[in-house]
Amino acid sequence: MNKLVLAVSAFAAIAAVQANAQTVVTDTDGNGTYSMEELKAAYADLTEETFKAVDVNADGAVDADELQAAIEAGTLPA
């Protein structure tokens, strides 16, 4: 019984840490915006359609404000 309680507690702790983890997007080329490839590294299931929706000004790149707005709108997970 004690092992079961410990196992359940450990699982709950891991789930809590994962729930609080935040996705990190890295500007690998240092140009101040995020490309499809840079966002895809952080969001593996990102589609071209979603990228275009996040890229509100349609300049082919996502800036920090667009990224934050997409996260707040739920378009991208935090």
Image (cartoon, grey):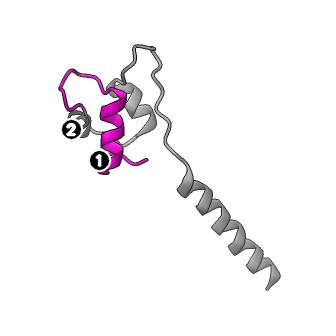
Residue 72 inside the magenta-drawn segment: yes
The label shown at residue 75 is 1
Rendering coords of residue 28 (x, y %): 47, 19
Rendering coords of residue 55 (x, y %): 24, 31
Count neighbours of disc 2 (C-alpha within 10 A) and say few if under 14, some if 14 to 19, many if 20 or more. some
Q: Which of 40 and 71 is in front in this view?
A: 71
Residue 75 inside the magenta-drawn segment: yes
**What residue is shown at x 55% (from left), y 49% (from top)?**
21
Circle 1 SS class: loop
When the figure is inspected, residue 71 is found, relative to residue 28, above or below; the finding is below
Nearer-N-terminus badge (2/1): 2
Count neighbours of disc 1 (C-alpha within 10 A) and say few if under 14, some if 14 to 19, many if 20 or more. some
**What residue is shown at x 50% (from left), y 36% (from top)?**
24
Q: Total marks drawn? A: 2
Q: Distance between the residues labelled 2 and 1?
A: 8 Å
Residue found at the very far left of the displayed protein: 58
Q: Do the residues labelled 2 and 1 touch (CB within 8 Å)?
A: yes
Q: What kind of residue is marked 2?
A: Ala
Q: Mark 2 points at which residue?
A: 53
**What residue is shown at x 31% (from left), y 41% (from top)?**
69
Identify the magenta region. 55-78
